[in-house]
Image: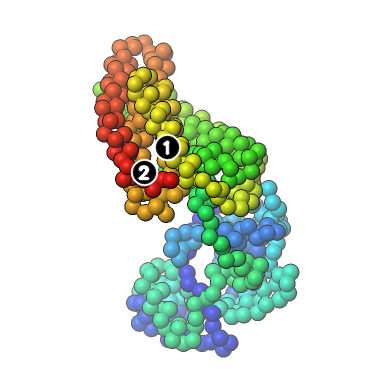
Amino acid sequence: MQTATETERKYEVPAGFTLPDLSGVGGASGCGEAETHELDATYFDTGDLRLARNKRTLRRRTGGHDAGWHLKTPGGGSSRTEHRLPLGEDAGTVPEELVAEVRTIVRTRELKAVARLRTHRVETPLQDAGGRTLALIAQDEVIADTDRGEQRWQELEVELVDGDAEVLDAVEGMLQAAGATPAAGPSKLARALGDRLTAKTPRRVKPVLRYAREQRDAIEGYDAGVRAGDPEAVHKMRVATRRLRSTLKTFKESFDAERAVFLRDELRWLAGSLGAVRDAQVLSHKLVAAAEPFPEVATHIREKLTSDVKNGREALTADLNSDRYLALLDALDDVIDSAATDTAGAQRRARNVLRKADRLLDEAVADGVDAELHDARKRYKQARYAVEVFAEDAGKSGRELVKALTELQDVLGAHQDSVVAREVLREVSRTATDAFPYGILYARQEGVGAETLTELPAVTKASRTRKLRSWLK
């Protein structure tokens, strides 16, 4: 499968529109010889248009220089990423490679033809003095067939080739002066589908549901990056699963109780699969660097954790391709979108979780037990996520409380990292011929753990100031 990035702008034009003289526009010397193409594209989507509603278009198109299967996905700004495959022999079945790219959106729903667009295209290259094509200007006469009948219109596209955004700006000015207007919709398909894609005006969503939807959307949004092996996407998707699981627990009265319990278990499963990759990546970075004075030890640790990451990625890919994962996404939609509103006292529950975390930490510090410190850290995560729900609406105090809780959690996290690092060193040393270097590294990690705890009183005090917490009622 090939991928390409396209940057283009679309315009509506009146009947009989004539392309103006673009000589000197955006550094162009003029237009090259125009080519004419007859394009015939069938667009595929689910019955409820899940792809189009998520700004994806999937088509099989004949004619032109790039005949084949095309999947367009959002990029940065006005750019889009296009995934391309050859036409193949089966015109009615979407290739599995493209289905995999949109599986988290369509899930188990059938992809079927929803529109046919036939386009008479006159394509004109805008060139500089050296013959380099800066942009392609396509004048299209479109016939669209859907289950609602036939539509006809004319439009114009300007797609960058070797030019820059200034070319688009300059050309736009000339086109508008000649009678073109920016297209109201993002694509031909959107125009063909018309009011089937018209979004309802969203009502104001209460903080808990807004936060839950944001995390649900983040899980879906980072899916492609996780599949591609992006460590940051793995981290952020894991955080989103934790935030959402915590939200379902803290504000359980806002959701269907039985389904929420099921979702919390399933989110724990997904977070664990992501964590098997993420934890090994983080540990590898820290422990290999710490073991540099002992090259053989560093190699041993690197091999062990590299193997853990590889095995974790294979298991994670299998999980993301499983029916269980797709069922989890469907269940999230059902539970979150069916929740009507936040229940009374939601902010009070966030305050109570925070107070519980305070008590656990005080007890853990008094006892000096690592496991209790870890429990306190987990409770502070829950508290921080609960506070995040309302922080933006609370203004400066809300944002500063989130920051203070994050700093406290980071200190506890650094301490827990040292505990886990010691466990890994103990495990790896079992197969070593010389355990002495591992003992040195183990002692150093004990020192790291002890040193991080010296920072705990200051960050604890900073997180408990009355000024930061007074808005939690």
Q: CA distance from mark 1 to mark 2?
A: 10 Å
Residue 46 in which image quadrant: bottom right
Mark 1 near mark 2, Cβ–Cβ under 8 Å?
yes
Residue position for label 2: 469
Instruction: Give residue 105's position: percent from left, percent from top.
Output: 60, 52
192 to 469, vertically: above or below:
below
Instruction: Give residue 215's position: percent from left, percent from top.
Output: 51, 47
* Residue at the image position 39 percent from the left and 52 percent from the top: 394
**SS for dot 2:** helix
Instruction: Give residue 405's position: percent from left, percent from top.
Output: 36, 39
According to the image, what is the colour scheme of the structure? Answer: rainbow
Q: Say which amino acid is labelled 2.
A: Arg
Q: Rate crowding at label 1 as few (under 14), some (14 to 19) or many (20 or more) other CA atoms within 10 Å.
A: many
Residue position for label 1: 354
Q: Say which amino acid is labelled 1.
A: Leu
* Residue 333 seen by the camera: no
**SS for dot 1:** helix
* Residue at the image position 34 percent from the left and 12 percent from the top: 435
Say the numbered circle drawn on residue 466: none
131 to 314, vertically: above or below:
below
Q: Is residue 169 left or right of residue 85?
A: left
Mark sitting earlier along the chain (1/2): 1
In the foreground, 389 or 199: 389
In the foreground, 347 or 442: 347
* Residue 468 seen by the camera: yes
Residue 419 in which image quadrant: top left
Q: Is residue 260 left or right of residue 123?
A: right
* Residue at the image position 33 percent from the left and 52 percent from the top: 396
Q: Rate crowding at label 2 as few (under 14), some (14 to 19) or many (20 or more) other CA atoms within 10 Å.
A: some
63 to 250, vertically: above or below:
below
